[in-house]
């Protein structure tokens, strides 16, 4: 994916408002932003010790620069694309940090079944990567809660991930589905224990 031709759309134009929110004390220790260095396909976690320095609007822009659609984001001498090229969630970067609970939001996975087509195949791939990352977190003693779109949310989302045509419907469906998932006994118990701690 990092080798795809550069997209034509400028993600930084869409994220211009982030520049208004920037503070000189970035990076904060609890904010990490994943992107992929285009030169060699390596995941870079901006904000983590040892990562290149980057203003937050550039780090977030790089993490959203979907290859082939958005232009890569230049940070220093290198260009970067969406961290989803490495992993749809990058949840496993949280191993070894003494966390009690990780909440994973995974819009690219969800039950795709075995219907043919690119988007269903992409969902199945994302689900496999997510399962490996959740297993890695739980092997490290970290409890996890995963939010991902079910069949109804996927129907509303459709196959065009860049379309804004049904944005209000997607937000509404996701809100109610996430609330229902959070209210299940297993999830609500984990969330309650994490916030009581």
Image (tube, rainbow, N blue to C red):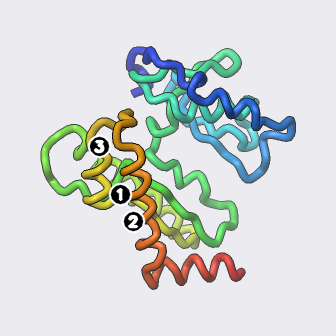
> Residue beneath label 1, please?
149
Using residue 51 as the reference point, say whether residue 73 is left or right of it.
Answer: left
Tell which tag, 2 or 3, sits nearer the viewer: 2
Q: Which of marks 1 and 3 is nearer the N terminus?
A: 3
Using residue 135 as the reference point, say whether residue 110 is left or right of it.
Answer: left
Q: Position of residue 114 (x, y in %)?
A: 15, 53
Instruction: Evaluate if marks 2 and 3 touch, with contact meaning CB atoms under 8 Å apart.
Output: no
Tell which tag, 1 or 3, sits nearer the viewer: 1
Residue found 43% across the figure and 18% down from its top: 7
CA gap, disc 2 and disc 3: 21 Å
Instruction: Evaluate if marks 2 and 1 touch, with contact meaning CB atoms under 8 Å apart.
Output: yes
Q: Where is residue 40 in the image (x, y as percent from the top left)?
A: 51, 24
Question: Is the residue 161 above or below the residue 76 in the image?
Answer: below
> Residue beneath label 2, please?
177
Q: Earlier in the sequence, mark 2 or mark 3?
A: 3
CA gap, disc 1 and disc 3: 14 Å
> Residue beneath label 3, please?
122
Residue found 47% across the figure and 23% down from its top: 70
Quarter holding the C terminus is bottom right
Quarter holding the N terminus is top left
């Amino acid at each position: 994916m990092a080798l795809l031709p550069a997209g034509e759309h400028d993600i930084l134009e869409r994220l211009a408002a982030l520049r208004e929110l920037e503070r000189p004390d970035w990076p904060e220790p609890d904010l990490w932003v994943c992107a992929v260095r285009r030169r060699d396909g390596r995941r870079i976690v901006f904000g983590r010790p040892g990562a290149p320095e980057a203003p937050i609007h550039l780090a977030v822009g790089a993490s959203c620069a979907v290859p082939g659609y958005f232009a890569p984001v230049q940070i220093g001498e290198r260009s970067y694309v969406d961290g989803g090229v490495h992993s749809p969630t990058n949840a496993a970067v949280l191993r070894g940090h003494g966390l009690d609970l990780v909440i994973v939001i995974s819009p690219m996975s969800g039950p795709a079944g075995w219907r043919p087509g690119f988007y269903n195949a992409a969902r199945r791939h994302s689900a496999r990567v997510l399962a490996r990352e959740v297993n890695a977190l739980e092997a490290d003693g970290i409890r996890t809660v995963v939010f991902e779109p079910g069949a109804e949310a996927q129907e509303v989302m459709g196959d065009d991930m860049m379309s804004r045509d049904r944005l209000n419907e997607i937000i509404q469906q996701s809100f109610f589905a996430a609330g229902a998932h959070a209210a299940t006994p297993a999830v609500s118990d984990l969330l309650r224990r994490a916030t009581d701690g």
